[in-house]
Image (tube, helix red, strand yellow):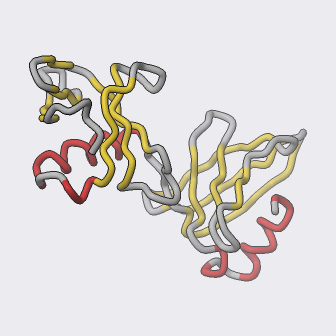
Amino acid sequence: MEDKNKALTFFESEGGFLGVKIGSETYDRVRTVRLFPFTDPSKYISIRVGNDMGEELAVIEDLAGLLPEQRELIERDLDLNYFLPQIKEILSIKDEYGYAYFHVITDKGPVRFAINMGGTNVTKLSETRLIITDINENRFEVRDVTKLTKKEQRKLDLFL
């Protein structure tokens, strides 16, 4: 863990935010940023002041090396920052006026969203894994397209 040669102690601040004490300095609101969100989600976690663009205070090399209660605080913050519902079923995709309108079932429930047809809103992370970003910058994951039905896979062919 790179920590500017000082121990990090994480806590939940009065406002419910993630805070950290580094040596004699206390930050009541920090943000966690995954440096490799898709390939190493529990490694190389940047701790920053306030927001994504804030000053980097430290980088945690691997969450597994932290005490369980410290890891839990960081994971809770990461879960808030990286909400990524998984698409389990594609009910429909309609193409109208330059937008694709999705109606899907995710691990969090049914969702309707739209993507811009002209953009790069579908990112292929591997041969089977996709990230779809809607017009509001919400992200949805298809972990394994081969687990979708052939009919559902054909609906996605337009974007691959």
Residue 151: percent from left, percent from top? 76, 78
Place residue 18 in its image quadrant: top left
Residue at the (27%, 48%) spot, across then down: 75
Tell me: 126 left or right of 87. right
Total marks placed = 0
Quarter containing the C terminus: bottom right
Quarter containing the N terminus: top left
Q: Is residue 26 something that shows in the picture? A: yes
The correct choice, above or below, for 13 with respect to 70 in the image is: above
Residue 26: percent from left, percent from top? 15, 19
Residue at the (87%, 42%) spot, across then down: 118
Q: Which residue lies furthest to the front in this view?
A: 5
Residue 58: percent from left, percent from top? 31, 33
Tell me: 83 left or right of 27. right
Place residue 20 in its image quadrant: top left
Residue 148: percent from left, percent from top? 64, 77
- Judging depth in this view, the residue of 139 and 52 nearest the camera is 52
Tell me: 5 left or right of 151. left
Q: Is residue 10 something that shows in the picture? A: no
- Judging depth in this view, the residue of 160 and 7 nearest the camera is 7
Residue at the (26%, 30%) spot, across then down: 4
The correct choice, above or below, for 23 with respect to 8 in the image is: above
Residue at the (63%, 67%) spot, across then down: 129
